[in-house]
Amino acid sequence: MPQYAILIYSDSDPAAEHDSAELAEHDTHSADLIQSGALTAAYALAPHTAARAVRADGVTDGPFTESKEVIAGIGIIEAPDLDAALAIARRNPATRHGSGVEVREIGGSYVRGDESAG
């Protein structure tokens, strides 16, 4: 079954706080995806101010791009097609809290310990 990366965007303001109800909504959403079998992996990222960019001319401290939003987390889901992946992404609480979600099909993969991944 195809896999899709769900990139969760958030306001780039490091002072932005998330209340406990909003965090609980994200936890419930994740639990629902786990229960359904759609979620294969999910990662919350450290604040964007801890990012480092590696380029040919060296390493730059983050944030290193001019952007209104930053990637706050990544989820990997399995869905039969893009329409199904978009339906899953629409349920992400970030879409109701002023943030966004990007869906991208995974073209290839490597998972340590799973040599059948491709």
Image (cartoon, grey):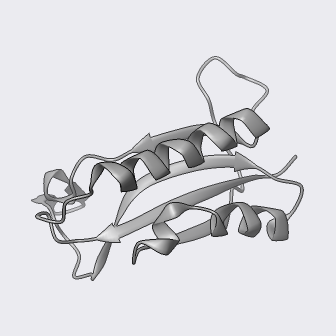
Instruction: In the rendered view, tell whether residue 7 sits above or below residue 31.
Output: below
Instruction: Please count the marks in the image.
Output: 0
- Percent from the top left, x then y, of residue 93? 51, 62
Question: Does residue 100 appear anywhere in the picture?
Answer: no
Q: Nearer the viewer, residue 31 or 20?
A: 20
- Percent from the top left, x then y, of residue 52? 19, 54
57 left or right of 46 in image: left
- What residue is drawn where x is 63% and y is 17%? 113
115 left or right of 17 in image: right
The residue at the far front in this view is 21
7 left or right of 76 in image: left
Instruction: In the rendered view, tell whether residue 100 sits above or below residue 93.
Output: below
- What residue is drawn where x is 30% and y is 48%? 20
**Which quadrant would residue 89 be assigned to in this image?**
bottom right
Question: Does residue 116 appear anywhere in the picture?
Answer: yes
**Which quadrant would residue 72 be assigned to in this image?**
bottom left
- What residue is drawn where x is 42% and y is 53%? 73
- Percent from the top left, x then y, of residue 8? 46, 62
- Percent from the top left, x then y, of residue 15? 11, 64
- What residue is drawn where x is 62% and y is 29%? 111
Q: Nearer the viewer, residue 25 or 3?
A: 25
